[in-house]
Image (spheres, grey):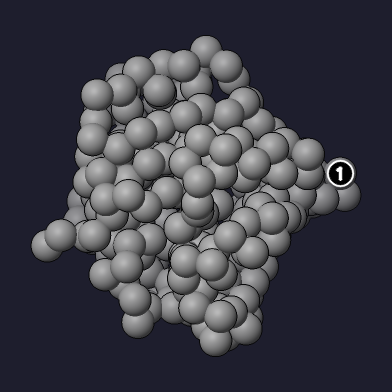
Amino acid sequence: MDLELKGRTYVITGGSDGLGLATARRLAAEGADVAICGRDKTRLGAALSVLEGLPGGSIGVQADVREVADLDNLVDRTLDRFGHLDGVMNNAGQAAAGAFEGLDDAEILADHELKVMAMVRLTRAALPHLKERGGAVLNSLAASAKAPVAGSLPTSASRAAGLAWTKAMAQELAPAGVRVNAILIGYIDSDQWVRAAQRADQSYDAYTAALAQRLRIPMGRLGRSEEFADVASFLLSPRASYVTGASVNVDGGFSPVP
Ligand SMILES: NC(=O)c1ccc[n+]([C@@H]2O[C@H](COP(=O)([O-])OP(=O)(O)OC[C@H]3O[C@@H](n4cnc5c(N)ncnc54)[C@H](OP(=O)(O)O)[C@@H]3O)[C@@H](O)[C@H]2O)c1
């Protein structure tokens, strides 16, 4: 299926690694132009070299999504380079899960700022441009948005908030031609699991195989970043033109709820 991405432009936060980079790669392979961001300049440079030579163009913008000025600059730089904007993927984030009794206010508010307010602010900055072209917003969330479990705070609360924003914004923005969707991620290969394996002093394969077994993931393995990217690219593309306010589980059957 042709996703009709040629000549379209997408901003991807946290596009310098993991799921964001896999999605940028998929979009650029299909001819879309992508602007990726991250805080670490070296990581951003390495990601850009992965995107080099693909049919779509790419730029990297150093940005911390917790900074409003960085988000505004990300949108401005994208427009300067590519002239228009067709979609935004709010994806930058990192794991933050622990027990309620160990959490202080600062940690809870920091997670909300990173995972909720960054999405709100970037979507706000991009919206006038998305309205011009009938664009799309895609929020990378987590299965815990609908199925929080012990030890999953504050992430599960931030992800549930992200889901509420997704649904309400989708209904508000549909008349303006802007779609808003979310992916609820289970456990997918990425650097965060590489780091976890290192902390546990185990090989990546051994660590993730044991993790999949312990979590009872029905498909028996973690997902691949390309499997996430395929779903994300579809939801961002005009081929998903009648899909808005939806959340899609990409989790190998892990979530107990649809
Ligand atoms: N992989 C999973 O199994 C899984 C499960 C549930 C949810 N998720 C969510 O999916 C998203 C992507 O996860 P991933 O596994 O691809 O993570 P990853 O491999 O650790 O990549 C995270 C990306 O986000 C960027 N980032 C982090 N904090 C940032 C900030 N404040 N400002 C700008 N960029 C920032 C990182 O670059 P810098 O560090 O250089 O800034 C990097 O590019 C995250 O929101 C994560 O919480 C993932």
**In the current view of this chain or complex, which residue is farthest to the left?**
1
Query: Dot 1: few (<14), some (14–19), or many (≥20) neighbours within 10 Å?
Result: few
Residue 133 x %, y %:
47, 66
Residue 254 lies left or right of residue 72; in this view the side is: left
Q: Which residue is drawn at 30% across and 37% down?
A: 56
Residue 225 x %, y %:
30, 42
**In the current view of this chain or complex, which residue is farthest to the top?**
42
Query: Which three-letter amino acid code belongs to the residue tagged 1?
Result: Ala
Residue 8 x %, y %:
37, 52
Q: Residue at x 62, y 26 (%)?
A: 62
Q: In which quarter of the image is the N terminus?
A: bottom left
Q: Name the residue under label 1.
A: 106
Disc 1 under 8 Å from ligand 1? The reply is no
SS at badge 1: helix
The answer to whether residue 46 is visible is yes
Q: Nearer the viewer, residue 168 or 107?
A: 168
Residue 177 x %, y %:
49, 78
Q: In which quarter of the image is the C terminus?
A: bottom left
Q: Which of 47 and 241 is in front in this view?
A: 241
The image quarter in which residue 205 lies: top left
Q: Residue at x 23, y 35 (%)?
A: 55
**Measured along the vertical axis of the image, is residue 17 above or below residue 164?**
above
